[in-house]
Image (cartoon, rainbow, N blue to C red):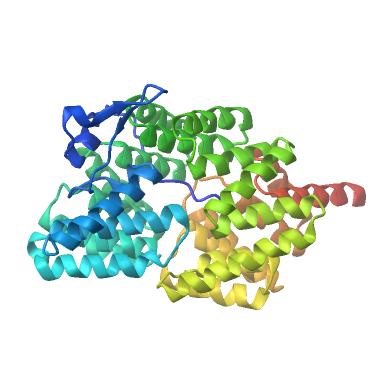
Amino acid sequence: MLVRKPQFARWDGRPVRWRVAAVVAVALGLTAGSVASGADGFQRPEVPALAAGVPVERLAAGDLTRGVTALQRHLQAQPRDASGWATLGAAYVEQARTTGDPTRYPQAEKAFRRSLELRPATGNDAALAGQAALAAARHDFATALSLSDRALRVNPYGERALSTRVDALVELGRYDEALRAVELADRRRPGIPVFTRYAYVLELRGDVRGARQVLLRALDSAFTPADVAYVATSLGQLAWSQGEFDEALKHFTTALRAEPDHVPALEGRGRAHAARGETERAVNDLEEVVRRHPLPGQLAALGELYETLGRREQAEEQYALVRTWTRLARANGVATDLESALVEADHGDAAGALTAARAEWARRRSVHTADALAWALHANGKDAEALTYARKAAALSPGYRNASFLFHRGMIERALGDDAAARRDLRAALDLNPGFSATGAREAKAALSEGQGAS
């Protein structure tokens, strides 16, 4: 059962400065005549070659593709445009993220290197920030943090560097520093990328209500289809994690109305349908998701749904695809140990899962790596050690409640013969989010039923 990987954010109740209006249009260098209104009323820019500083992570997929093509043509004609190479590198990183194609990462690396050859790092924060985002995408969070700091020494107000610095600290499990980093980012560059990170930091601190509040405010400030889809999807993911499936569906519908091709919203809708027992709709959505975006979490979710429907052969195909993606990602510089540990612990090589989880724990000590290591240890019958790490996952961020974590701890306690603790945690997992995993929820219910029968 792969846990949801939320987008990051924090809100502490103080007034937030909402200065998002016109950022995308200005960054793209658009004129008043280059903006068209779509049938849904949203302002849709016609995307030229991407300009320096363009927020590529907030463009619709089609706009990003067209912008990249135009920028490639521009760089053929003007190969000494350092800013253009940095922007192209950032666009490649975003394309890899949105399509699940890790072969874009070496292309991004070359583009950033070319930019730095043309303009030294002391005056090229865009390339440094891009390299930081690339390192984060490859799960090298220590390098991402170092490069973000270098970029911010050149330009303390760089949005990409400020955002990536928050991401890196969160993924390294340095949550108090992440809080200070996102507060700094909010002072310097308030906007949707920072607000969503604010919300996740808050969620990690156990304040779901505050996280929802900041995301609702961010949604109010969103004025492009891509921004609406991004924030509404974050709201849907948060609602889903709390078992509020009807509310989650409303947010995913909002996201898909703004941007019909927004894959994270489609995935969220599929997971919400699955949680509500609407399996045909869930399968349709998740099959479309993996067709467009075949990443481990999505592939495993579809595989587990197939399992609950008795379609074991199709489930195994999804797990095999996870392994194929993992090999491809590793070949392109991505550290995949966390994904490998979770998938293999549930659906494959238990010994390999433990090796991967221990390697990831050595690199970063976050709540997610602690949980993955606990689950891999359980898969290998090392339940006493597994319980130590399951407790670490809870202690690293007190107040953060995750149904998958509770399920893992409950099953470990059950294996150790602590039936009372197991019932408490398995029940808590189902109470929090009864649809946290198609197969995990089924196992939790079975374990609780067996415990009742024994008593």
Kindly tell me whether residue 388 is visible in this rendering.
no
Residue 256 % position (x, y): 50, 33
Q: Position of residue 430 (x, y in %)?
A: 70, 42
Q: In the image, what residue occupies the spot 25% across and 29% down?
A: 35
Q: Is residue 199 left or right of residue 425?
A: left
Quadrant assignment, res 9: top left
- Give the side of residue 435 with respect to residue 135, left or right: right
Front one among 446 and 41: 41
Q: Position of residue 122 (x, y in %)?
A: 8, 64
- Which of the 4 quarters of the picture holds residue 195? top left
Image point (55%, 27%), residue name: 250
* Residue in view at x 33 percent, y 51 percent: 178
Q: Is residue 423 above or below residue 134?
A: above
The N terminus: image quadrant: bottom right
The answer to whether any part of residue 45 appears in the image is yes
- Position above or below: 210 against 88: above
Q: Position of residue 367 (x, y in %)?
A: 49, 57
Of residues 448 and 135, the one nearer the viewer is 135
Question: As rendered, which of 34 and 53 lies closer to the eye?
Answer: 34
Residue, x 34% and y 29% (percent of image)?
222
